[in-house]
Structure formats: C-alpha cells, structure tokens
Image (spheres, helix red, strand yellow):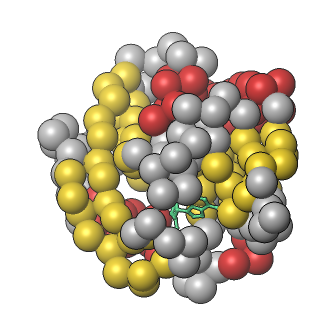
Amino acid sequence: MLKKLFSREDIDNAVKKLASLIKRDFDDEKIIFVCLLKGSFMFTSDLVRCINNPSRVDFMRVSSYGNAMTSKGEILITKDLEENIEGENVLIVEDIIDSGLTLKYVSEVLRKRKPKALKICALLDKRARREVEMEADYVGLTIDDGFIVGYGIDFAEQYRNLPEIYIVEKD
Ligand code: IMP
Ligand code: MG
C-alpha cells in the first residue's frame, strides 16, 4: 500500500529552495548537472528549469540496488558521463541518500577527474540510515526510515511516473 508523504506543492517548494541556494553559491557561473539515473530524472528536470545559469546536463548510472529493498553494498558504473568535467563546476543530482555508499563512490570517482568544484544536491535524505560519512551540500527533504517511491523513484522499476512522493507500507 502507498501512503502519500510529499505533495506536488511540498516538492515544488523543496526544488525552489534548493535552486536558490545553488544559485547563491554558484552565482552566474557555468554548472554541469550530473543526473544520477534513473531515480533523479524528474528531480533534475525540475531543478534545472529553476536555475538560469549557463549549464550542461549529463547523465550517469550506477547500480547498487537490485530489485530488492536492501542494498547489495556493491556499486558499479553502468553508464558514465560524456562530458569532460575537468575544471568545471559540477553538481551531482541525486534522488535519495540512504547508506551514503552510492554518493561516496560517485563523488570519489568524479573528484579524481579534477572538477573546479564538486557539490552534491539530494532531494531526500534518510540521515539515520548512514553507513558511511556522507553529507550532501544541499538537501531538499529529510525523512525517517521507510521505502520511498514516486517522482522518479522506483520499487522494482514501478511507480517512477507518480508525480508525488509516497512511502511503501506493508499491507
Ligand atoms: P545508498 O547508496 O544506500 O545511499 O542508496 C542510494 C540509492 O538507493 C538511491 O540513489 C536510490 O536509487 C536507492 N534508494 C535508497 N533508498 C530508496 C528508497 O526508499 N526507495 C527507492 N530507492 C531507494
Ligand atoms: Mg538513485
């Protein structure tokens, strides 16, 4: 069963808040947005529309979760960036931070490519579930434990198309 956790209005407000913080930090500089597929596709498309800096959007896919609700604890790049990020302002855009393993891995990989700046923006943060030290520079909404779907985020590839954010509850 799905229970609504965040409405369209909650999400819009979070995106606008994030966009103004990012805009404040990056001023009018160029930004390369790195959308982590697939979960951040909707979030990225809303976020970039609120930031009018010169920008590029690129995509990366890493896998750590299979079709289960628990992490395999193993991360693989299954689609890498096409942009060269050396000397660029890079903003990683992620849907949810859970254990922190994915973002720790991705940020370490991207940092080796010598960007000018590397920041992390996450729509949702399950802070209590961290297994490694990992703080995003920008966090939209903080949540407790629980499995989230909607607004790009899936359970076994389902529910990405829902416009709001839901929590999966056991029947
Ligand atoms: P981490 O590596 O444990 O921080 O996991 C991050 C990734 O796991 C996110 O990018 C999501 O794709 C996925 N994930 C974590 N929590 C959830 C959830 O509640 N619902 C769906 N996917 C999740
Ligand atoms: Mg993800």
Which residue is found at the position 54% from the left and 40% from the top? 160
Taking the image as drawn, is residue 28 in sight? no
Which residue is found at the position 69% from the left and 78% from the top? 129
Which residue is found at the position 29% from the left and 48% from the top? 60
Residue 99: x and y in percent read: 58, 76
Does residue 111 lie above or below 137 as drawn?
below
Q: In front here: 103 or 28? A: 103
Q: Quadrant of the N terminus?
A: bottom right
Q: In front here: 53 or 69? A: 69
Does residue 79 lie above or below 126 as drawn?
above
Residue 136: x and y in percent read: 60, 59
Residue 61: x and y in percent read: 30, 53
- Location of residue 96 (image quadrant): bottom right
Task: Report the label total.
Answer: 0
Residue 84: x and y in percent read: 16, 42
Whether residue 54 sits left or right of residue 94 in the image: it is left
Which residue is found at the position 40% from the left and 36% from the top? 33
Taking the image as drawn, is residue 81 in sight? yes
Q: Quadrant of the C terminus?
A: bottom right
Whether residue 121 sits left or right of residue 147 in the image: it is left
Q: Quadrant of ligand 1?
A: bottom right
Question: Can you name the residue that lies furthest to the front here?
Answer: 171
Does residue 161 lie above or below 91 as drawn?
above
- Location of residue 11 (image quadrant): top right
